[in-house]
Image (cartoon, coloured by chain):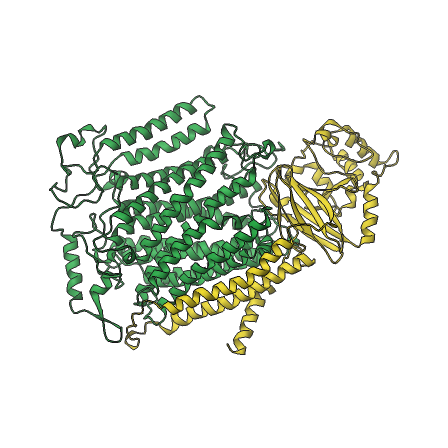
Chain colours: A green, B yellow
């Protein structure tokens, strides 16, 4: 790549940011690790918000006919609890893991398109802020009956049509305020963020693997990331179209879902779940990838049936697109449809089972260390078995007619997405904490967190199974005392507060250990994958020397050989090898080029809510100007970005030498 | 498997279903043949799931304890990378189990999604937030309380007037949507006379929680009596009574623009267009419950508090608070109680 004066910063509108530290360093960074960290913290803030919403819901339901929340407050809380946990917590925290770890695990110095990565993050942040600004600016509008008694909300006006936004309740006639516009446009923005990052991850995985890292030598976490990226790529356009349709229905008078004019409200459900079911696997597969890394490491054994686990993950991804109507068994779809989707739902249990059996095969005969990450991963497997089995009971279609829209379903998907995804994600947070911070977390607090979580989780979501079967319907802000549902609901509420205590313990552990934990040894877990060949915290350039891979679990095989029995024997040179990794890792033999920081990704993100507000308030004097300003900001930023080289030729801390390895594809393509 | 472990599984499975509340919405306490059949299918699946749960979780716990790192006493593990035979086994066995429950599943789907030719048809229309029942053969309409004969297949022909609702009487059958602009059917069948609780199960707006239902199953003879009583016009209050005062208020005020009382209200334009429509009140007090089946007639003051401020009880209610005086409220309540 030739570097000429014309490609320097002279063409850009702003002076190129050059700080890698401090506030502007974070705002303008294109470093996948910093972006990953920001994703993580931002998602965690939303996790706290979603959790507080859940606690309010649980206080309200702790006894029959409670008056703690009003109906409109309750509806906003359950809508935003679901929306937040799915779109603003689990998805972005998974993106945090992808961002931080994917390049490290495949031996790359960054993702394929570093600034696009930053754009994904900033669009996510501004999309989340936009969605939540509904509580400040949104209006619920009067009910159709026009009777306003008791519609005042002490919590502001949040979206209140459910995270599923079923038509026609989410349409203009039944939600005449602006809150559902905030919801539909907010999700549109958030979807864009995920779509961009999915393309980025796919290109990264297929183009930037280290020498020798064939596809079937990739860590399972990378595999699951790849499957998730494809799921995002194919499912997000569906919800994008559907959200556009509902936005058009609400704002420009199209009638896609309005039955009074021949539209079809069930069509919305097909669109929503055709996205929504792959979405479930988008949420769970990253955690499955994490668990597939943690279990082998702490069992000191390779993953049992690596190819089976990989193919099962891919199979789940494919089949995930063919089961959506099981969310609609009560909708009156034809018996043929119900039978077909019942059978496909049963079928998806098979690859899921394969994963579980292989995980048990992995720990079987191992030498199991019950550190915090391992506890969370084992907890994941146990809880996921329960969630998986209750999932199979939904595929028994007539039984699902009883279960659907009850707390039995709430129990099921929390066993999958909390006992599953969130346990897996916490496992990953503890497992890679030393990599991230260079320090060790407190094992005592970590284990306490696990057990508090485990008890709180099961107390919260276990009784929901029988609450649902006993007739507790979802999304109801009150229930009658005669239903006999009071006592278990109280237990559930207590459980929810125990979970909150667990989160508090985690936060204490994290903040304290990040500053005061003991310095992490190099390779603290005697691990198997490439990221542990790097010093902790990871240097900005990741790999001082580009790694060469010769096998699956390459790092492990560099440390261990096997005796005649097939048991690992530490190679005599292993200790020296680790010392060398540490030494070289901190002192790259050659200068390394990295993408320069840029203002533009932030500005692209900042333009999104302007367009959103402009669309919602297009009937006011400032609506259209704001929309145009947002559009100009976005387009202008893309142009500025287009003429700005990925790497400045005379950036302060790296010289430009011919033939260097650089992390981007071609220096301009991102 | 030893006998003891089978007992353990049976215990675990029954522990789960023993958590039946005995409450009026308990799907684990089915009453009609349809719900009982579905419950049987669920319990079969639950038992299989319990066996799998015990085996898998048992293996997980056993491995965790048995292969725990006990320092030097635990040797380095053999580096087993997989086993093709195991992969086949734990693929094929689930396939066989699932295939075995797939057969009755598909059978029941077809069995319970269409009505028999001789079924008794009743039309159900969902409104925010109450269910309307129309008896097309008998020419009357009622609300909140669905009355059916025992030992007969009831075919509910359902639709919605506004948003999507979901009809659920757990002891008699599973759920089915009521979709605006579309027709769905739900079968009900009760063997025993009795009162069965129901609830709208799909989120349908502000007062979704207060959209409840009752099904009263009667012996065929009682049902015939009930039918003829419902076909009568409304009782007329005697002159000079408080009930008559209430009727006059009803006819002279806003009530009549949404509610029909056969033999009392003249046809009025709002009712004719069906744009604003409340429950038919002709035999209001023959129904145990009102206001979306959330209030009992027998509770002292229930009718009065409802008339006084409906949106307070059912947020967003189409029935407004029209600032009636206490005297007016009492007169109207007395009139409504007289509509047997």
> Which quadrant of the rendered structure holds the C terminus of chain B?
top right
- Residue A428: x and y in percent read 34, 56
Of the pair A477 and B196, the residue shown nearer to us: B196
Query: Is residue A277 positioned above or below A603 on the image?
Result: below
Residue found at the very far right of the displayed protein: B239
Residue A495 visible in the snapshot: yes
- Residue B209: x and y in percent read 61, 45
Of the pair B148 and A535, the residue shown nearer to us: B148
Query: Is residue A219 positioned above or below B304 on the image?
Result: below
Q: How many marks?
A: 0
Q: Is residue B270 left or right of residue B81?
A: right
Quadrant position of residue A148 = top right
Residue at 36%, 28% in the rendered image = A630
Q: Is residue A408 left or right of residue A433?
A: right
Of the pair A223 and B259, the residue shown nearer to us: A223
Residue B289 visible in the snapshot: no
Quadrant position of residue A296 = bottom left
- Residue B142: x and y in percent read 74, 42
Q: Is residue A123 left or right of residue B25?
A: left
Residue found at the very far top of the displayed protein: A621
Quadrant position of residue B89 = bottom left
- Residue A564: x and y in percent read 24, 76
Residue at 52%, 28% in the rendered image = A253
Query: Is residue A603 positioned above or below A44 on the image?
Result: above
């Amino acid at each position: 790549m030739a570097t000429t004066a014309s490609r320097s910063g002279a063409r850009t509108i702003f002076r190129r940011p050059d700080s890698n530290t401090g506030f502007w360093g974070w705002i303008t960074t294109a470093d996948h690790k910093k972006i990953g960290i920001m994703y993580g913290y931002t998602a965690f803030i939303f996790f706290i918000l979603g959790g507080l919403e859940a606690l309010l819901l649980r206080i309200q339901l702790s006894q029959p006919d409670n008056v703690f929340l009003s109906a409109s407050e309750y509806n906003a809380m359950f809508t935003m609890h679901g929306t937040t946990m799915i779109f603003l917590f689990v998805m972005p925290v998974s993106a945090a893991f992808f961002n931080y770890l994917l390049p490290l695990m495949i031996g790359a110095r960054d993702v394929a398109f570093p600034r696009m990565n930053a754009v994904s993050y900033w669009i996510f942040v501004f999309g989340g802020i936009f969605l939540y600004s509904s509580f400040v600016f949104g209006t619920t509008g009067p009910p159709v009956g026009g009777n306003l008694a008791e519609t005042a909300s002490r919590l502001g006006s949040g979206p209140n049509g459910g995270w599923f936004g079923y038509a026609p309740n989410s349409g203009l006639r039944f939600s005449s305020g602006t809150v559902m516009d905030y919801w539909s446009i907010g999700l549109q923005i958030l979807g864009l963020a995920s779509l961009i990052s999915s393309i980025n991850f796919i290109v990264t995985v297929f183009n930037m693997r280290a020498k020798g890292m064939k596809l079937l030598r990739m860590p399972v976490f990378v595999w699951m990331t790849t499957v998730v990226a494809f799921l995002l790529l194919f499912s997000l356009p569906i919800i994008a179209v559907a959200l556009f349709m509902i936005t058009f229905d609400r704002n420009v008078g199209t009638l896609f879902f309005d039955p009074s004019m021949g539209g079809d409200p069930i069509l919305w459900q097909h669109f929503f779940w055709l996205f929504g079911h792959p979405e479930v696997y988008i949420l769970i597969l990253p955690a499955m990838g994490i668990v597939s890394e943690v279990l082998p490491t702490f069992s000191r054994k390779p993953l049992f049936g690596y190819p089976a686990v990989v193919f099962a993950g891919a199979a789940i991804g494919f089949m995930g697109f063919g089961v959506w109507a099981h969310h609609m068994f009560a909708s009156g779809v034809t018996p043929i449809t119900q039978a077909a989707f019942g059978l496909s739902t049963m079928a998806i249990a098979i690859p899921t089972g394969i994963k579980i059996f292989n995980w048990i095969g992995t720990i079987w005969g191992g030498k199991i260390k019950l550190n915090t990450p391992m506890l969370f991963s084992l907890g994941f497997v146990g809880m996921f078995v329960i969630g998986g089995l209750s999932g199979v009971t939904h595929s028994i279609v007539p039984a699902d007619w009883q279960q659907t829209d009850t707390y039995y379903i709430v129990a099921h998907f929390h066993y999958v997405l909390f006992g599953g995804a969130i346990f897996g994600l916490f496992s990953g947070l503890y497992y890679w904490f030393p990599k991230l911070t260079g320090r060790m977390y407190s094992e005592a607090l970590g284990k306490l967190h696990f057990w508090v979580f485990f008890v709180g989780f099961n107390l919260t979501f276990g009784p929901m199974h029988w609450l649902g079967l006993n007739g507790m319907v979802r999304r109801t802000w009150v229930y009658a005392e005669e239903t006999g549902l009071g006592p278990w609901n109280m237990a559930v509420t207590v459980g929810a507060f125990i979970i909150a205590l667990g989160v508090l313990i985690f936060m204490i552990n994290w903040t304290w250990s990040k500053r005061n934990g003991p310095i992490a040894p190099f390779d603290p877990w005697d691990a198997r994958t490439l990221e542990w060949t790097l010093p902790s915290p990871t240097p900005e350039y990741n790999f001082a020397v580009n790694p060469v891979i010769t096998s699956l679990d390459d790092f492990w095989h560099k440390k261990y050989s096997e005796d005649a029995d097939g048991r690992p024997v530490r190679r005599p040179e292993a200790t020296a090898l680790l010392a060398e990794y540490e030494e070289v890792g901190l002192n790259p033999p050659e200068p390394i080029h990295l993408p320069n920081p840029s203002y533009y990704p932030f500005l692209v993100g900042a333009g999104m809510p302007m367009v959103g507000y402009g669309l919602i308030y297009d009937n006011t004097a400032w609506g259209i100007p704001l929309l145009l300003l947002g559009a100009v900001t976005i387009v202008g930023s893309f142009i500025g970005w287009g003429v700005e080289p990925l790497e400045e030729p005379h950036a302060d801390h790296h010289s430009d030498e011919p033939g260097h390895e650089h992390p981007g594809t071609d220096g301009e393509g991102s | 498997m030893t006998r003891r472990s089978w007992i353990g599984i049976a215990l675990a499975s029954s522990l789960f279903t023993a958590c039946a509340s005995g409450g009026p919405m308990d799907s684990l306490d089915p009453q009609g043949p349809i719900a009982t059949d579905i419950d049987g299918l669920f319990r079969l699946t639950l038992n299989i799931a319990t066996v799998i749960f015990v085996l898998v979780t048992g293996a997980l716990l056993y491995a965790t304890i048995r292969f725990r790192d006990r320092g030097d006493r635990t040797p380095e593990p053999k580096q087993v990378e997989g086993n093709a035979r195991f992969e086949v086994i734990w693929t094929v066995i689930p396939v066989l189990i699932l295939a075995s429950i797939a057969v009755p599943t598909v059978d029941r789907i077809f069995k319970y999604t269409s009505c028999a030719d001789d079924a008794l048809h009743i039309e159900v229309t969902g409104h925010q937030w109450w269910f309307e029942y129309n008896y097309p053969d008998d020419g009357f309409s009622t609300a909140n309380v669905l009355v059916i004969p025992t030992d007969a297949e009831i075919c509910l022909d359902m639709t919605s007037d506004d948003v999507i609702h979901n009809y659920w009487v757990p002891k008699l059958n599973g759920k089915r949507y009521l979709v605006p602009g579309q027709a769905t059917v739900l079968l009900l069948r009760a063997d025993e006379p009795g009162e069965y609780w129901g609830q709208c199960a799909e989120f349908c707006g502000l007062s979704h929680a207060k959209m409840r239902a009752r099904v009263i199953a009667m012996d065929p003879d009682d049902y015939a009596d009930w039918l003829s009583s419902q076909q009568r016009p409304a009782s007329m209050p005697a002159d000079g009574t408080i009930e008559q005062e209430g009727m006059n208020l009803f006819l002279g005020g806003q009530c009549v623009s949404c509610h029909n009382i056969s033999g009392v209200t003249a046809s009025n334009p709002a009712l004719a267009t069906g744009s604003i429509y409340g429950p038919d009140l002709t035999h209001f007090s023959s129904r145990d419950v009102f206001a979306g089946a959330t209030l009992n007639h027998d509770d002292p003051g229930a009718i009065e508090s409802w008339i006084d401020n409906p949106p307070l009880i059912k947020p967003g209610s189409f029935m407004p608070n029209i600032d009636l005086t206490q005297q007016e409220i009492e007169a109207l309540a007395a009139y409504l109680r007289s509509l047997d």
